[in-house]
């Protein structure tokens, strides 16, 4: 869009600026001399009183912005600006792009066209792809990678280079599967993160290993793999790692060995390439996408000066960004967290994340000031001292991880093993089937809704034993006082991977416990309903909230201390019972082991325990009980016996 030449007075009636010097107003954001531009807000209701707005506002910045607003949201008259654009914010972020945030609208990105702006770390910020094809995007990806490798010290390898057991050599037309001994020690490689989909991709198995070492026909590769080969070549790299081809899929020993190396593979890859938009290996991800259209505006500072030109574009909606298919895959969670450099091909655009920058094709991310990235593991680990180990682990790792899907549920621990290993190397704790021994009292305070039994063995005290995508955890756990103590702990590993699957485990807990009656009535037949039930403390009128991990079935008994009668207790339902939930009696007798209390608000937390059908004399976790201090007097709690429970 071109506007009429504008003659601007010395003082701006909108923002109050006294300088019309664009070189001062839009300088390098790291040394901006005009503080008002760093947090610039304009209330258009106070400014636009007439149906036709006045561009003679007084400064080149506001004139440019107003011209862009009118050009972008143009209608027969301009009165719509008052109700729809109530406030506008300008911020100056990295890469010298101006971001225009408009309340209720998508952001607009502005770049002044002036030769004096130099030293752009990523090249011209307005030189972003505008076509639907992938060629311009690939050139941009190459620029991003080169800039990161040459100027980001924090993204460099902190240890010796690692070469996986096998890599694909993509230099020839037909990729070859090479062994580690055939690959130079310092060879950079790309690691692909992708969805397998319902139809299995091309795989390496014992019967075709030799054939794949001689070469895999390019035509035989599914579309996603072909695209990964193409990008690897364009980026100037020789080697590519793809899980289904670089792990012998029908060799149990090889799969266990290689699946334990995910931290090294994705952490040492020169680049992790994410086929985010592809639902399966056959979809491909180099495809036509929406283009980023550009507009142009010209503003004259005064009648004697040359016009100042800027280009602008509407950014994609990053605030309400929809999940890509890869965002729902559990294995991809640790692949993303391990990456030093992460290049994602999404439905709308390509994005880049490294330890220093977050960038995107449309330029919105590159215009944002540096901020905490929830998927940057190094930044996350830096918060350990503030949040505490368990709060950070469950809220930032376990909860988002369990919202993703696994094709094979028994992969639940191994698909997170790389993240656990990185936490351990930073913190030095002992890992127990998804929790940390050093913070175990607080780690046991997780709760869930709509849980189901898992088809594999796991200790009941771990979140791993529950199939649910609705876990939660109290943020105040770090600030609570422990009421129980942990004794001996043990887990039985299923493989040599200490962060991998387990077939069982036990913990000894010692603390004050109360008997209670859990009132359920008929078992619910709706898995989607919250399994929250009222629970009455024996011998009192006090009732508390109980969050059951999953539906229960009657099992065993607990001797009532008051009536000296054995009352029916409960167990978790088994996996084979998941579709036919048994009828339950009106009440179950249970133990509640008091675990922690928050000093400020006095909220108690306790484990709900019932007798274990797997090991006589032991107990299993049934859920979590919560109640306020006033509902359970401290003096009354102290009168109860200290008991010991072995929970399996």
Image (cartoon, rainbow, N blue to C red):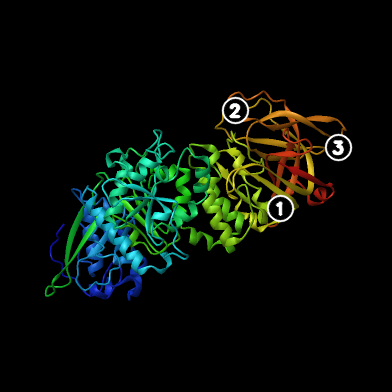
Residue 10 position, x and y percent, is: 22, 75
Disc 2 packing (10 Å; few <14; some 14–19; many ≥20):
some
Position of 96 relative to 342 (above/below): below
Say left or right for 3 vs 496: left
What's the mark number on residue 434?
none
Crowding near the residue tagged with mark 3, few <14, some 14–19, many ≥20 C-alpha atoms within 10 Å: few
Label 1 vs 3, first from the N-terminus: 3
Q: Secondary structure at mark 1?
A: strand
The reply to whether callout 1 and callout 3 are in contact (CB within 8 Å) is no
Placement of the C terminus among the 4 image quadrants: top right
> Is 149 above or below relative to 485?
below
Which SS class for mark 2? loop
Q: CA distance from mark 3 to mark 2?
A: 33 Å
| Foreground residue among 299 and 98 | 98
The disc label shown at residue 578, or none: 2
Judging by the rendered image, the residue that carries numbered circle 3 is 561
Label 1 neighbour load within 10 Å: few <14, some 14-19, many 20+: many
Q: Quickly name the residue at label 1.
A: 597
Is tag 1's residue or tag 2's residue first in the polypeptide sequence?
2
Q: Residue at x 61, y 27 (%)?
A: 576
User: Does residue 4 appear in the picture of this structure?
Assistant: yes
Of the two numbered discs 1 and 2 in the rendering, the one whose residue sits closer to the viewer:
2
The Cα–Cα distance between marks 1 and 2, rounded to whole angstroms, is: 34 Å
Q: Nearer the viewer, mark 3 or mark 2?
A: 2
- Per the image, label 3 sits on a secondary structure element best described as loop
Q: Position of residue 320 (x, y in %)?
A: 38, 48
In the image, what residue occupies the spot 51% across and 37% down? 408
- Answer yes or no: is residue 285 visible: no
- The first of marks 3 and 2 along the sequence is 3
């Amino acid at each position: 869009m071109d506007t009429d030449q504008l003659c601007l007075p010395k003082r701006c009636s909108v923002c109050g600026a006294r300088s019309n010097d664009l070189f001062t107003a839009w300088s390098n954001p790291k040394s901006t001399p005009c503080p008002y531009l760093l947090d610039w807000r304009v209330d258009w209701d106070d400014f636009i009183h007439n149906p036709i707005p006045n561009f003679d506002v007084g400064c080149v910045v506001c004139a440019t912005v107003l011209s862009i607003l009118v050009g972008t949201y143009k209608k027969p008259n301009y009165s719509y600006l008052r109700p729809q654009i109530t406030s506008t914010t300008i911020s100056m972020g990295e890469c010298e792009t101006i971001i225009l945030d408009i309340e209720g609208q998508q952001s607009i990105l502005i770049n002044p066209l002036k030769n004096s702006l130099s030293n752009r770390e990523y090249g011209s910020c307005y030189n972003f792809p505008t076509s639907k094809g992938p060629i311009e995007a690939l050139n941009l990806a190459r620029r991003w990678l080169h800039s990161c490798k040459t100027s980001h010290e924090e993204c460099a390898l902190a240890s010796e280079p690692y070469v996986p057991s096998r890599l694909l050599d993509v230099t020839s037309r037909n990729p070859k599967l090479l062994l580690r001994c055939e690959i130079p020690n310092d060879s950079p490689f790309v690691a692909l993160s992708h969805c397998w989909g319902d139809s299995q991709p091309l795989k390496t198995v014992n019967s075709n290993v030799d054939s794949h070492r001689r070469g895999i026909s390019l035509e035989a590769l599914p579309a996603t793999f072909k695209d990964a080969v193409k990008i690897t070549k364009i980026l100037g790299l020789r080697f590519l790692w793809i899980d289904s081809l670089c792990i012998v899929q029908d060799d149990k020993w090889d799969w266990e060995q290689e699946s334990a190396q995910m931290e090294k593979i994705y952490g040492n890859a020169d680049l992790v390439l994410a086929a985010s938009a592809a639902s399966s290996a056959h979809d491909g991800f180099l495809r036509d996408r929406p283009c980023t259209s550009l507009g142009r505006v010209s503003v004259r500072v005064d009648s004697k000066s040359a016009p100042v030109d800027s280009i602008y574009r509407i950014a994609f909606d990053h605030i309400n960004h929809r999940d890509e298919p890869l965002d729902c895959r559990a294995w991809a969670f640790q692949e993303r967290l391990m990456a030093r450099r992460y290049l994602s091909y999404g439905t709308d655009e390509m994005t880049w994340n490294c330890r220093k920058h977050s960038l995107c094709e449309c330029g919105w991310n590159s215009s944002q000031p540096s901020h905490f990235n929830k998927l940057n593991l190094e930044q996350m680990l830096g918060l350990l001292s503030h949040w505490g180990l368990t709060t950070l682990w469950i809220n930032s790792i376990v909860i988002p991880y369990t919202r993703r899907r696994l094709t094979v549920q028994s992969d639940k621990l191994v698909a997170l093993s790389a993240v656990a290993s990185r936490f351990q190397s930073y913190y030095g704790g002992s890992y127990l089937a998804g929790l940390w021994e050093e913070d175990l009292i607080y780690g046991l305070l997780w709760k869930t809704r709509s849980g189901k039994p898992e088809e594999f063995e796991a200790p009941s005290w771990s979140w791993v034993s529950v199939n649910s995508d609705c876990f939660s955890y109290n943020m105040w756990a770090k600030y609570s006082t422990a009421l129980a103590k942990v004794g001996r702990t043990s887990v039985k590993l299923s493989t040599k991977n200490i962060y991998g699957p387990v077939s069982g485990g036990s913990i000894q807990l010692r603390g004050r416990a109360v008997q209670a009656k859990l009132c359920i009535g008929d078992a619910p037949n709706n898995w989607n309903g919250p399994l929250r039930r009222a629970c009455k403390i024996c011998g009192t009128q006090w009732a508390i909230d109980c969050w059951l991990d999953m539906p229960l079935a009657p099992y065993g008994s607990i001797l009532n201390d008051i009536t000296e009668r054995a009352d029916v207790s409960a167990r978790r339902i088994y996996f084979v019972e998941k579709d036919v939930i048994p009828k339950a009696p009106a009440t179950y007798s249970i133990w509640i082991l008091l675990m922690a209390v928050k000093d400020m608000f006095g909220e108690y937390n306790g484990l709900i325990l019932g007798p274990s059908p797997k090991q006589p004399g032991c107990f299993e976790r049934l859920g979590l009980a919560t109640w306020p201090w006033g509902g359970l007097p401290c003096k009354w709690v102290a009168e109860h016996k200290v008991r010991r429970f072995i929970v399996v």
